[in-house]
């Protein structure tokens, strides 16, 4: 039968330096040949990476310490004489934002306040949470 994926790759959002394991479970008869692709090119394996074919058929791509260059679109391609299929996922790298500027409170109301601050120099979207201590 033509290859298919019982378990597909899933997206990951990581901080630089985090490890990640991409895992999928292809099947087919005859058993499919497996190839890993990153950004539509054959994956270049380096010393931080491990490719593992488990006895149960799972295919693992382990990256021990992610760097900016690891971000991108990954595909596991399963090919046999009947067909070729792929499962894909995205690895995105986040980074912790710098602290925002000192907050200012230009307006106060009975039980609310307007808090304004200059955002950090981070270009990526960022969310801050404010907490208020009850007296």
Image: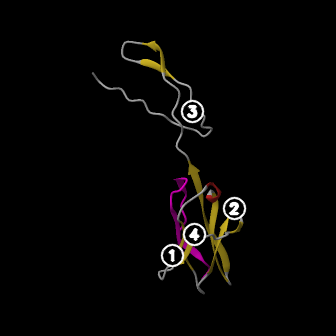
Q: Nearer the viewer, residue 11 or 63?
A: 63
Q: Is residue 15 inside the magenta stretch? A: yes
Mark 2 lies on residue: 39
Query: How much space separates mark 1 and mark 4, taking CA atoms?
Result: 16 Å
Residue 119 coordinates in the image, percent (x, y)? 56, 30
In-image side of 103 versus 71 (left or right):
left
Question: Which one is in front in this view, the residue at disc 2 or the one at disc 3?
Answer: 3
Closer to viewer: mark 4 or mark 2: 4
Q: Residue at x 52, y 30 (%)?
A: 100
Q: Which residue is mark 4?
A: 49
Q: Is residue 86 above or below residue 115?
A: below
Label 1: which residue? 58
Tell me the distance, in whole angstroms, between the alpha carbons under discs 1 and 2: 22 Å
Instruction: Please provide the residue range marked out in magenta.
Output: 1-25
The answer to whether marks 2 and 3 mark residues whose Cβ atoms lie closer than 8 Å is no
In the depicted structure, whether residue 44 falls above or below residue 2: above
Decide which of tag 4 and tag 2 comes sooner along the chain. 2
Instruction: Please say if the residues under marks 4 and 2 sit with CB atoms less than 8 Å apart.
Output: no
Question: Which secondary structure, mark 2?
Answer: loop
Mark number for residue 121? none
Q: Secondary structure at mark 1?
A: loop
Q: Which mark is residue 120?
A: 3
Alpha carbon separation for disc pair 3 and 4: 34 Å
Left or right: 3 as drawn, with respect to 56: right
Point out the tag, 1 or 3, that comes first from the N-terminus: 1
Q: Nearer the viewer, mark 1 or mark 4?
A: 4
Of callouts 2 and 3, which one flags the residue occurring earlier in the amino acid sequence?
A: 2
Given the current orientation, which residue lies at the most extreme bottom position?
Answer: 30
Please tell me which residue is depicted at 48% across the width and 23% down the height of the picture: 103
Instruction: Give the structural element (helix, strand or loop) at label 4.
Output: strand
């Amino acid at each position: 039968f033509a290859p298919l994926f019982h378990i597909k790759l899933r997206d990951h959002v990581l901080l630089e330096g985090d490890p990640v394991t991409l895992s999928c479970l292809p099947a087919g008869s005859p058993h499919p040949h497996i190839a890993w692709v990153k950004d539509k090119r054959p994956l270049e394996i380096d010393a931080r990476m491990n490719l593992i074919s488990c006895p149960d058929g799972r295919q693992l791509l382990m990256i021990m310490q992610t760097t900016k260059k690891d971000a991108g679109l990954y595909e596991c391609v399963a090919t046999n004489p009947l067909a070729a299929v792929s499962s894909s996922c995205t690895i995105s790298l986040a980074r912790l934002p710098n602290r925002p500027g000192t907050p200012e409170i230009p307006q106060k109301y009975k039980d609310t306040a307007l808090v304004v601050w200059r955002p950090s120099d981070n270009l990526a979207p960022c969310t801050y949470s404010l907490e208020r201590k009850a007296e």
